[in-house]
Structures are given as C-alpha cells and as structure tokens.
Amino acid sequence: MTPTPGTPPNGPGRPRRPGPRRLSAAAVAALLLAAVPAGAAMSADATPKSATGPEGQKLTVSATTGLDPAGEKVRVTGEGYGSKSGIYVALCKDNGANRVPSPCLGGADMSGGSKTSQWIVPPGDPYEGDLALPFGPGGTFDVEIEIRSKGDGLDCAEVPCSVVTRADHRASGDRTQDVRIPVTFAGQGPGEPGGEGVDVPAGTVSYKPVADFTSAGKPLDLLLHPESKKLYVGADNLPDTADVDERGLYVLNPEDGKAESWISQAPGPTGEPRASTAARISGPLPGDGVVYNYPLRGVGTAKAGDKTAAGVWLAGSTITDIAPGTAAGTVLVAQGTKLSEIATATGAATRSVTVPGGSRFAADHARGAVWFSDVAGGKLHRVDLVSFTVSDTFDLPGADGLAGFIQADPATGAVWVGVNRSVLVFDASGKLVKTLIGKDLARDAAFDTESGRAFVVWQDGGDLSDPANDNNGTLTVYDSAKFTPAAKDLSLPGNQSQLGAASLAVAPGGATVFVTSPAEGKITRLVRQVSPLVTQAPADRSVKAGEEVALTARAEGTPEPSVRWQVSTDGSQTWRELDGATEPVLTFTAKTAQDGYRYRAEFRNDVGTTRTAPITLTVTEATGGGENGGQNGGAAGGDSGGDSSGGSGDTSSGSSSTGGDASTGTSGSGDGGSSAGTSGGASGSSGSSGSTGSSAGGAGSTVGGGAGGSSGTETTSGGSLAATGLTVISVTLLAAALVGGGLLIHRRARRRTTGLA
C-alpha cells in the first residue's frame, strides 16, 4: 500500500513509536562496512565528489565514475540540511535544475527496508526509528546505498543519472532539498554519443505535415514510381464538386503536388473509352506508368502524358483486388474468392483457383505465396504461386470484424492484416507473432525495405455520435522486424472513413510519406524529422592555467540542429549559455577561477533539444615546485597540514591550521576528537604531496570511539575516502567481527585514536 502524504506507511493513524533500537548483527555489519573506506571495496574510481545545494547543503558521494553496472555500494554524506523536512537519498534520473529527480532506483523508500535508497528525517519525526534515520547535528547524515545502472524504470545507459537528495513524499514539490551529483557506470563514460534528450529522447523520429495536395479529386490509392519518381493517384469524384468529373488516374509532382497528367478515360465493356474511376493501383510498369483496376472489371495501363488508358474488360464478377503477376505482362486479379492470373494485353486468364473465402489478398512473390484474408470466416488462406493451389489455412482472429487491409512485407515475408482497430502480424509460415492495437480503424500499410520500417494509417470512424470517434486519424511507424514503435505517432486531423479508406505511399528510405484523406479530398505530404543525436561529445579535461582549451561536440538531426554551449559554476545545479558560443568547437584560455567548471553543448531543432553529458574542467597552476608549489598543493587539498585538538565534551571536533609536518599528521589530545591532515609541502618543498586528511572521533563516539556518547565524524577534502588513516579490513574480518563485535569495535577505536594503521 502506498501511504498518503503525512500518513505512516504501516496504516492510517497508527504510527510506529520512535525509540531506541537494539543493533542486530546485520546492523553491526552495516556500521563496520560504513567505516571501511569506500575505495577499499569498490572497483570504481573512489574519488569523492561534492555538490552544494540551493540552501548551502553539501552533498558528497564516495565514488561517481566507473561504477559497476551490476551494482555496488557507495557512501553518501551530507551536512547543512537543517531540520524542516525529511529527505530521500537515492540514484535518480537527473532532469536538471528545478525539475524533480525521477524516476529513482528503488523508488521512494517509505518502508525503511530499502538498500537502494535512504529516508532521513529530523530528530523526533514520527517516522524516526525502523522506517527512517534521523539527521545528526547540523543537519548531517552518513549513509550507504546500493546502486546499479538499470532497474525500476531507470536505465542510466539511456538517461543521465545522479545520486540525489530530494524532499520526502510529504513535501514532494519542495525543490530546495534537491542536490545532485552525476554518476556514470563502467563502459558509460562522459562524452558517449547519443546525449540527453530534454523534451524527447535523443534521436526521436517524427513526421511533420508539410503540404496538402488537392489536385486529384477524391484520392483512393497511391503509388510512388520507383524509377520515374512520379506520384500516381487513383481518384474518384468528390461529393461537393459533383458538377466536375474528377475520376481517373493522376500523375503528380511529388514535391509540389501539381498534376502533370490526368488519364480520365479507359476502355469499357464494349472497348470504347469512357470516364472511369481508378480504384486500385496494381504496380509499376518498367520505366514509368502503372497497371490499375477501374470499375467494374477493367484492367488498365497508363503512364504520364497518356490521354486514355489501354485496357481490357474481364468476364465474371467485380474485381475486388489486384497485384502484379508472376511474369511480365500479367496481373493477379481477385474476383471475390476466385484468384486468376491474366494477360494485361488480352484479358485472358492463364490459370485460376477458388479459395474457401475472402476477397482481398497480398502477394509475396519472393516466397511464391498469395495470402487471402477471410475476415468474416476468421481464416487466412495461403495460395502457392507455383502450383496455384490453396496450400494452407490459418486462424484469423477478429471474425465478423471490419476488414481493413492485407499487405505482405517484401523484406521479411510477414503478412499484416488490418481488422477493426488492430493489425494482426503473421510470419511467413502463418504463425501469429504480433497484434498491434490502435485507437482508430486500421486502413492501409506500406513498407520501406531500406529503413526496415512499416507504416500504418488508421482512420477515425467519422461517426461523432460514437464516443470512440474524434474525427482524427493516426499514422504509426514500426520496426518491421521487431514490431516496436519507430517514430512518434502523428495525428491526422479530419481523416475519417465515411467517404473511403485512406492509403499510403512511402519514398525509399522513409524520408517522405504520402497519406490520402478521401473525405477531405487531399493527399498530405509528410517529411521525417529527427531530434538531435550527439555524434561527438567532449570528455573531462585537465589543463594548466593559461593553456588553450578546445571542446568539440557534434550532432545530427533533421532539420540540421543548432548548438549553444553552456557552463555551470556550481556543480551542475544551474546552467547559463555562453555568449556567442554557437559553433561545434568551443575554445578559450583556461583560468584558475574556472577550476571545477562544468560544460555541455545543447543542440536544438524543431523536434527537440539534446545535451551532451556535462564534463568537468580541472585547471591547475601553471608553475610548480618550491614554496608556491607547497602552497598551491595545500589550497587544492582544502586543508593545510598541521593538527588541531578538540576540546572536551561528547562531540569530536577539529579544525585545520597552517603549517605542520608534510608527511604525517599529529594526533590531538584530550577528551574531544582530533583532526589531522597533510597538505602542501614542508619548508617549501614539493607541493605534490599532501591533500589528505583524517579525523577520528574521541571518547564518546559510537564507531571509532569509546563507549557511550555521540558519534565522531570523518572528513576528507579533495581526496579518496580511503585516506582516513583507517585500516582496510576484509569481508572475512567483518564476518569475524560479528562474533566478537564489541571487542573488535573497542580495539579498532583505540587503533584509530592513536593513529596506528
């Protein structure tokens, strides 16, 4: 059960009573593990990273790069969080400044049992106890979480991820607790191609209407000729232009839709030409032109420039479908359940077969098959084109449904059958492998073998008294092998089925698509668009002050994306655009003030915005050695050698002081804690040593101190958590510690207090 804000997770009005908890063996082990330097047990680069929050909070994560994708533990500490609200600590998708980090690995932990997140609350909070940990003095916390690259709806290989703090479920809209530290996993370093899609995923494909062609009456069928590149349109009369006869075969310029030819007449039953609708286009003629069907039983051929089609009139019943034949000069024709192959010059049938049911078919010449859809009978029949016999029959779900279309994918041999608001996909053996569900009526499909894409047009029913109808159709695009969406769905306003079924034509490569809307008397030309996809991205840079920095980022997309470089001076909390930085290469001279700055490139086009992963610029002093080197080393480390003794009391404390020995820290004395560190050089010697420090709790600390009292803390600055003066112990030793827990803790406390390793 998911608790409501302000309601304890174990039930309304029944909060668990906060109180002291006895540490179990597992808890003792957890404490010991927390005391082990993070770098000692991790394969990742155990260099801590810190970030500052909007209210001065400081968040530190023990390791942030090269993490094990299968999962590993990281130590997360914080200070300055105050006591006004509880927080979650977790690995989450980083959605940027002022946007909630979500989703998160493990979700929001409101049970107290998660290993992938931690819930921390102000002291005295009703949830303190088994469910949540309390903040320490000064709004501090020190926890461990297990993170992995993928899980619970989060995939850090696809989206940017950060270890974050965020307000708990009682104040989920509070962004003042958001502090983020980006992390990457092994094999997923900064600078990888792809990028972070801001509004849509990087490389998102969509289609945009760019023109409506209204020069071809009521369009019924389309074919884009593979050689001449002309757009052939079979058309009928529009009801609202009944005074003008618009029937016939149109040849359009596919770029602007202007009619180059109109073949309005074809031979009738007596052989005399007459005005005829071009109902269905069978296929292309060599070079240019098409074979098509005109009512009721006509088969015609025509090309651009013709005034009248050549054609034959067949005997028998009305033609219900037509497709290219198995030899030049022949076509396959369905007249209800009768399938024939006829010669286009004479109309003579060379062979025929009667199938058990159906009237529409799809021809797969590469595999020698014709597939008949018998929606009313709930069957799919296969006709072998060599023997011209029915070779097999399969169940077709959706009996008594509205038949939409049947098409064969020339690349895979899969058969796509539109029935009502679904498309049933059968493989070449007749096995149903996929059912695609749409919100409208499935009306036609087309395939592009170059891109491996299948295009389906869906029409609204057009009856607005039905709540399922909204008068808008849809274009969907799928990977024709995996049947997964390959582009964003596109709404087709006004495309409804009351005046005829929509049809499709796709240019090779899938960059252009044509969709008919018979009810509106138009053909819509669509062009493919792609949101920016990063093809080259910068990586972290380390330079000396005064050196020139060149960062390069490139992206592809349609339309061509523009680029703007951005910088963050506060650890990716906020970003600003750099004036004039609109080229793929950003160059500048490094200054010491830019140390720690983060940079990224943002690419934009009409489809969306994509950013490169942020990279960090490290700038060091141009000179080294001597007294200056020692001072610089101390400044980079954050503390400068020396020792400071804590005063008496329960809480360990320490502060840095200048000077001291460069090789060892000196332990403090007294009841309080001591802080020791090394930073900088001694007596003006090399500045390369130092930048490590250690702090041990004195008497009164729980871990690393004596019995009773409050906890000491460990602090590092600019170095690994392994540099704490704490002995690295193995997992075996940790297990042994559970046997003699109290003794081991006491002995380790004494060892740390005396600075022994």
Image (tube, rainbow, N blue to C red):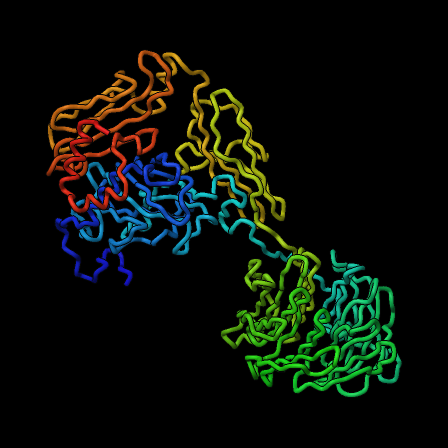
Residue 187 % position (x, y): 47, 43
Instruction: Tell me if residue 226 comes above or below residue 747 in the rendering.
Output: below
Q: Residue at x 49, y 74 (%)?
A: 467
Q: Residue at x 28, y 63 (%)?
A: 1
Viewer-nearest residue: 151 or 32: 32
Q: Residue at x 67, y 61 (%)?
A: 448
Give the left or right position of residue 735, taking residue 317 as reference: left
> Is any atom of residue 277 visible in this view?
yes
Q: How many marks?
A: 0
Give the left or right position of residue 408, taking residue 245 as reference: left
Viewer-nearest residue: 441 or 641: 641
> On the image, which quarter does residue 493 sit in?
bottom right
> Is any atom of residue 525 visible in this view?
no
> On the image, which quarter does residue 682 sit in?
top left
Instruction: Tell me if residue 518 comes above or below residue 29 in the rendering.
Output: below
Viewer-nearest residue: 22 or 403: 22
Viewer-nearest residue: 576 or 311: 311
Residue 119 % position (x, y): 26, 49
Quadrant for the C terminus in the image: top left
